[in-house]
Amino acid sequence: MKRVAIAAAFFAALLAGWQLLVMRGGFSPVLLPAPLDVALYLQDAWRDGSLTTATAVTGRRLLLGYALGVAIGLPVGLLSATRPFVQDTIGILALGLQTLPSVCWIPLALLWFGQTEGAMLFVVVMGTVWSVIIATETGARNIPPSYARAARTMGSEGFHKWTRVILPASLPYLISGMKQGWAFAWRSLMAAEIYVTILTGFGLGHLLHYGRELNAMDQVIGIMLTIVAIGLLADKALFAPWERFLHRRWGTGAP
Amino acid sequence: MPGLSGMTGALAIAGVSKRFKTKATTVQALDNVSLAAAPGEFVCLLGPSGCGKSTLLDIIAGLTAPDTGTVFADGEPVKGPGRHRLVMFQDSALFPWLTVFGNVMFGLKLVPDLTSARRTEIAMEHLRMVGLEGFARSNIHELSGGMRQRVAFARAMAPDPRILLMDEPLSALDALTREQLYADIQRIWMARRKTILLVTHNVREALCLADRVVLMSASPGRIQEVFAVDLPRPRDVNGLDVAEMAGRIMTALRVHLAPGTAR
């Protein structure tokens, strides 16, 4: 409870500081809107549905791309950890492409897919898949060999060994890799939405972009806050339960 | 439980050799090793590090293939791992993502023809056997080293293997915990009469537990001498009889391990 109170007090102080800065004057409201203006914008956008629609559009793109990235990255990472051929090919490719900021995929995505949902999906998948591959591979490689040996003597082979031993044993690495993948997916999607206008759906990035074009700084900051809030919420909803599980079972948060 | 009858669990190692090649050199880990264990016999492999005793255990478990020779378990040649030969490892190899109960259940779930109620029953029975029934829902990281090896013991015993292979399971524990486990292992072995092969470099440990102590020498890994131990059980690792015999074995060890004697 005490920690909740400290966190609440900190954010209240942050807001108060912001409000004081605005009231002191000297800043153009175009550059620094008051917290209340931002709140009003968010309220309006919520009421007229533009915020909820944009969140839904962005959320759908993110979840779809992320799920696809994990679905590809997980098995490829496991293969890369066990098959030297895969490691020497896809493994090296993943290591290289992981260093490429996912924004760099946008020009290519535009040329290949045009201004379509396909381009969005491509960018998110490219942002996710490489770090998931690397994390899975690292995780599977760092399993104490005695786990697999013990499992084999007890009769665990093939699919059973992979799903009941290798995968859960690499969980500490997997969770941090999936978390990193999530962060990359989120960043790349925002970049894609800011750069690429497509007519099949306006996401949060688009709202941010138009906020800038219209000099509506309350909208820009409002959307930024929304993006932060969604990021925090996703962290709590998607990863916190797994991290609690790791903490309970392994006695630590991560390796 | 077939193991209770004492009719199964015969082990025969026939002319097993194994060499490991590294970039610098070739190590003859095992050189024509032959050994037999009767059903229900407790055999200790004793030797310095590098004498290939762990490699031999791996070969019996079916985790490593020998270069030449064959291991027979109940007359059948060993071709791979199988749940009739379970292993206890030095680092316990308990799965941290499962509870204590989940770990004991892991091997049991792979035993066919058991109802899940029966599996639960067997798992709890074995946790009781090692005195940890109160820790069934605990996580592995919450246990001490000695408790972990107890759980590993329960996990290896629960699927009722014919042969139990123990790879220095007690060497990482403190002396007091170890002595407690000597007593437990003896008690459980006397009740269940599994064929047990235990690898150790601790002479007193071998004498406290084994029916026979097999002395091995390093590079090449060979059997040098076999000692029958017919001291009354339960034995005390600090007992005079154990100490007296340990002295004799230590002398033999020095002879076999002295430079120039191992050919």
Image: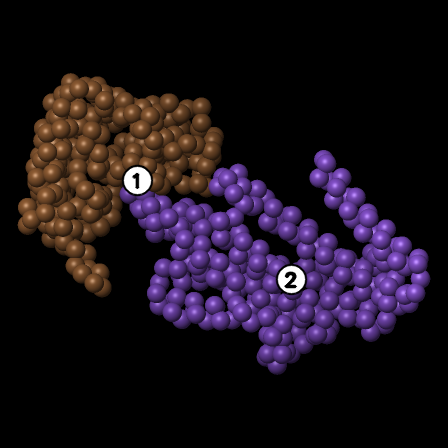
The disc numbered 2 marks a residue on which chain?
A
Q: Which quadrant would residue A90 be assigned to in this image?
A: bottom left
Q: Which amino acid, mark 1?
A: Phe
Residue B188 visible in the snapshot: no
In the rendered image of this protein, which colour is used for chain A? purple
Work out whether A101 lies above or below B246.
below
- Residue at which label 2 appears: A186
Q: Are dots 2 and 1 on a single chain? A: no
C-alpha distance separating marks 2 and 1? 44 Å
Residue A32 figure quarter: bottom right
Q: Colour of chain B?
A: brown
In which quarter of the view is residue B205 placed?
top left
Disc 1 designates what residue?
B89
Quadrant housing the N terminus of chain B: top left
Point out residue B117 in the picture as x, y percentages from the top left corner.
Answer: 40, 28
**In this rendering, the label closer to the viewer, 2 or 1:** 1
| Left/right of residue B246 with respect to residue A255 in the rendered view | left
**Residue at the spot 34% in from the left edge and 65% down from the top edge:** A84
